[in-house]
Structures are given as C-alpha cells and as structure tokens.
Image (tube, rainbow, N blue to C red):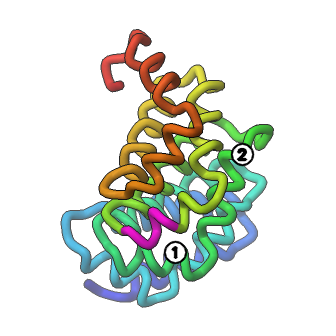
C-alpha cells in the first residue's frame, strides 16, 4: 500500500471544511473495511486514529458519523487497533454519544454502537473496560427508547459482543434488565433482528 493516499486523507481530517472532513473519514472507512489488515495498519501508521477521535465530538453529524464509522472499521478484527483506540481515550466520546439526551441523529447513534461493538469484539480487556463504565445500562436504555430497527439491531449485537465469554458483563446485562428489552425487540416486525 502506498502511504501517500491514507496520509493525505488523514491530513484532510483536520481541515476547516466539514464536508471535506466527512469525505476523508468515509474514504478512510472504505480503505479500512477491506479484507486485509494492511490498509488498517497503514492508516494507523500515518496517525489516523487521533484525528478520527477528535471528530467524534464534532458538532456536525456528517463528520461525526463518518469518523465513528472509520473507527469501527479500523477496530474490526484488529486487536492492536482496538487497544489503541481505548489507549487514546476513544471510549469516552463514544460512550458520551449514546447517553440519554445526547440528541444525536440515528445514523450517528447507529455507527457509535457499531464502533463500541467492534472495539469490544473478542477483546477481553476492552470488554471489561466497556463493561466497567455505564455503557451497558446506556445501551439498554438506547434499546428501550429507540424506534429505529437499525439501532436496535446494533445495540443487540453490541450487548452480545460484550457478553461473549465475559461472565461479569453477562451479569451486568441481566441486572440492566436487557433481557426484557431484547425479547421485546424479537417481537418487533424487523427481519434483521
């Protein structure tokens, strides 16, 4: 992989124009979503995680959503990147996004939940880190208050990821009364649940 393309895209994340930031983040997400870790590693090597994390707090939904999606793609099946995102403080803004009253558009919520799931997937330390916050109760609350089948599906997946081979998170999920909310989702009319 040529480092020039990803390096230029990472540089564009810091420009003033929000649409340029969003386009650059979407392009990085597309690169990172391939079947090879090589593209993910190149994006990290050229410093892509921190500017993407900065955009998680953007007041512009397009930049925010694209950055969160790119982080999810960088974390996907890559334990090194999962660890780096947490090490760089990435859980804090992601978890803030799913708090009640965040007022974020459903696309941002959906991508945020997906990113949290990717950061925790098959990574015991990150499952513990996520579970030790109020993330589980926030996810269950989001499941209850959402009327978006896509968000409900992402939340269900994230809860599964957090529970997978993690007894403490299983208990926390049960204590947050997620089972009732999940059963309620099963009775909804979505095919993707």
Question: Between marks 2 and 1, how big is the CA–CA gap?
Answer: 19 Å
**Where is residue 61 drawn, in percent x and y?**
68, 47
Mark 2 or 1, nearer chain start: 1
Residue 19 vs residue 75, the one in the foreground: 75
Which quarter of the picture shows residue 187? top left
Q: Are marks 2 and 1 in contact (CB under 8 Å)?
A: no
Q: Quadrant of the N terminus?
A: bottom left
Above or below residue 52? Residue 174 is above
Instruction: Please give the range of residues in magenta.
Output: 124-128
Is residue 42 in view? yes
**Is 125 colored magenta in this rendering?**
yes
Q: Residue at x 37, y 44 (%)?
A: 160
Residue 140 vs residue 90, the one in the foreground: 140
Is residue 27 in view? no
- At label 2, counting other C-alpha atoms closer than 10 Å, the crowd grade (few under 14, some 14-19, many 20 or more) is some
Which residue, given by chain and number where applicable, does mark 2 sit on? 99
Q: Is residue 95 left or right of residue 152?
A: right
Q: Residue at x 54, y 55 (%)?
A: 66
Q: Is residue 59 left or right of residue 7?
A: right
Which residue, given by chain and number where applicable, does mark 1 sit on? 85
**Where is residue 71 drawn, in percent x and y?**
48, 65
**Where is residue 16 drawn, in percent x and y?**
75, 69
**Is 34 colored magenta in this rendering?**
no
Q: Residue at x 42, y 89 (%)?
A: 45
Q: Residue at x 59, y 62 (%)?
A: 132
Q: Quadrant of the C terminus?
A: top left
Which quarter of the picture shows residue 130? bottom right
């Amino acid at each position: 992989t040529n480092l020039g393309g990803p390096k230029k895209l990472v540089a564009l994340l810091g420009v003033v124009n929000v649409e340029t930031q969003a386009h650059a983040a979407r392009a990085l997400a597309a690169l990172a979503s391939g079947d090879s870790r090589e593209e993910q590693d190149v994006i990290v090597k050229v410093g892509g995680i921190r500017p993407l994390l900065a955009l998680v707090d953007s007041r512009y939904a397009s930049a925010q959503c694209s950055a969160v999606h790119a982080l999810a793609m960088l974390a996907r099946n890559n334990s090194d990147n999962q660890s780096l995102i947490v090490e760089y403080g990435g859980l804090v803004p992601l978890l803030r996004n799913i708090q009640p009253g965040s007022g974020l558009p459903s696309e941002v919520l959906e991508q945020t939940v997906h990113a949290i799931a990717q950061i925790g997937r098959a990574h015991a330390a990150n499952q513990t880190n996520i579970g030790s916050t109020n993330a589980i109760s926030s996810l269950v609350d989001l499941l209850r208050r959402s009327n978006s089948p896509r968000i409900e599906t992402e939340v269900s997946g994230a809860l599964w990821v957090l529970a997978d081979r993690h007894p403490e998170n299983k208990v926390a999920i049960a204590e947050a009364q997620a089972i009732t909310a999940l059963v309620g989702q099963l009775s909804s009319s979505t095919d993707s649940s």
